[in-house]
Amino acid sequence: MTNNLDTMTDNLIVQKDVNSYNPHQPTKRMNIMTKPTGSACNIDCQYCYYLSKDELLGDKDGCKPVMKDAMLEDYIRTYIEQQNHSEIVFHWQGGEPTLLGVNYFRDVVRLQKKYAPKNVTIENNIQTNGILLNDEWGKFLAKNNFMVGISIDGPEMLHNTYRVNRAGRGTFKQTFAGIKILHKYNINFATLTCVNNLTADNALEIYRFLREDVKSKQMQFIPIVEPKSFKTTAPQHWKNEEVIFQGMPEMDPSHPNSVVESWCVSPSQWGKFLCTVFDEWLDNDIGQINVPYFEASIEAWMGRVNPLCTLAPMCGKGLAIEANGDVFSCDHYVYPEYKLGNIKDKTLEDMQFSAGQEQFGRVKEATLPKQCRECEYQFACFGECPKNRFIKTLDGESGLNYLCGGWKQFFSHIDQYIMMIVVTMGYKVHKKINADAMKIKFK
């Protein structure tokens, strides 16, 4: 491994100027997942955590959810006005946002131009299954410099296992046709690949497929983890019987009494998947392909705050807004218990920077069990996403992450290689986040 490390590390997407990070800078920047279609989607992925939101939060009038023109304009205006950064990014998700059609997003761009101050750059990211992408979409996305996140779980057989349409048929061919549109119009895109109980055992096949067939230069891998009660029970509101001890057989998704859904990835599968992909990336693609978990780990080993919210000491900066204007603490926390308000009644600024939302973000680190606090890799993980913390430690303390064993397997595997990369880049290894970086201001 690491044959030409000096050259390859030059292209890593890592913040190389340590002085450019200023935790005391009073910049107000928002990062809201905008869901103008709510949970409405044109496919029926069996592992989707969001499809059931229409039952939990559904429109009482039974109408198709869509952020209407007046609310859309008000949202875009306030989203821009209440930030003081030179670059403002809109994140469009769902459900499936392309259901709204190209003209809806033409209006989005028009409104952004209407309200953007001089010297402020507006950027747009859109997450899609790719099925509706055609030449019209391609021309629009290219012209307006949209960054596209496209969901694909691997080669056809693996992708079609869970990513099916309403008739139960696989969606691979339609998604791949959408990817061809992205290439045809030279649209910058990233692949989002869900790692479930079946795809987890095919790590190398999936990675090479994304690299060679999809030609993805940015690969995001998402572990699929949901407790059996996820459709109705909000995170941190689990019943006692749902919180089991680490290592119990019921942690296995294939167990008849498993605490998670059968399509979830197990901790050991997740660890093995990451290790396998990392080895291939390090051997052949470092500096050429961006895998956020890998490059974020380099930052962590440099003593910096992990740039990924799931692995950072604090979260709470990635709010979600539904089609009706309801705002929630996170798009994985779209439950009544975590509703911050509605943009008709409260400002985005008041919700984003509220004391309650700050508390939501800081609880991530404050509630770590002793096992995590004493772990040699706490600096790289911080207990991962709180939505997955429904396991008890062996001494009976709640708040352990379901994927803990997998993350530890991964971090111990990459440790020596990440240290080598950090040194090659000319930095010292710090397996502890420096004190200044930990003085994070929520705003």
Image (spheres, grey):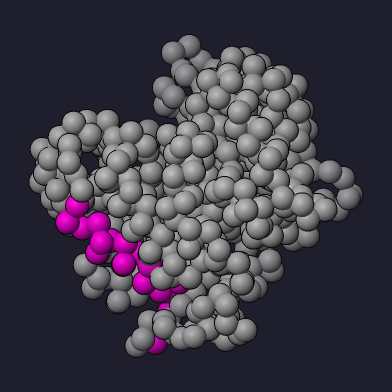
Q: Is residue 77 magenta?
A: no
Q: Is residue 409 magenta?
A: yes
**Dominant secondary structure of the residues highlighted in magenta in the image:** helix
Q: Residue furthest top?
A: 118
Q: Is residue 297 left or right of residue 189?
A: left
Which segment is the magenta one? 396-417
Residue 298 at least partly seen: yes
Q: Is residue 84 left or right of residue 331?
A: left
Residue 386 at least partly seen: no
Q: For the point 37% across and 52% down, which residue is it? A: 277
x, y (%) of residue 21? 25, 36
Against 109, residue 359 (above or below) is below
Q: For the point 25% across and 61% down, which residue is it? A: 413
Against 74, residue 416 (above or below) is below
In front of the other: 345 or 63: 63
Q: For the point 57% across and 48% down, which residue is it? A: 155
Q: Is residue 196 left or right of residue 56?
A: left
In front of the other: 151 or 102: 151
x, y (%) of residue 410? 32, 62
Q: How many marks?
A: 0
**Quadrant of the snapshot with the C terminus:** top left
x, y (%) of residue 90? 55, 31
In front of the other: 298 or 306: 298
x, y (%) of residue 77? 61, 25
Q: For the point 52% across and 36% down, which residue is it? A: 214
Q: Name the quadrant containing residue 45.
A: bottom right
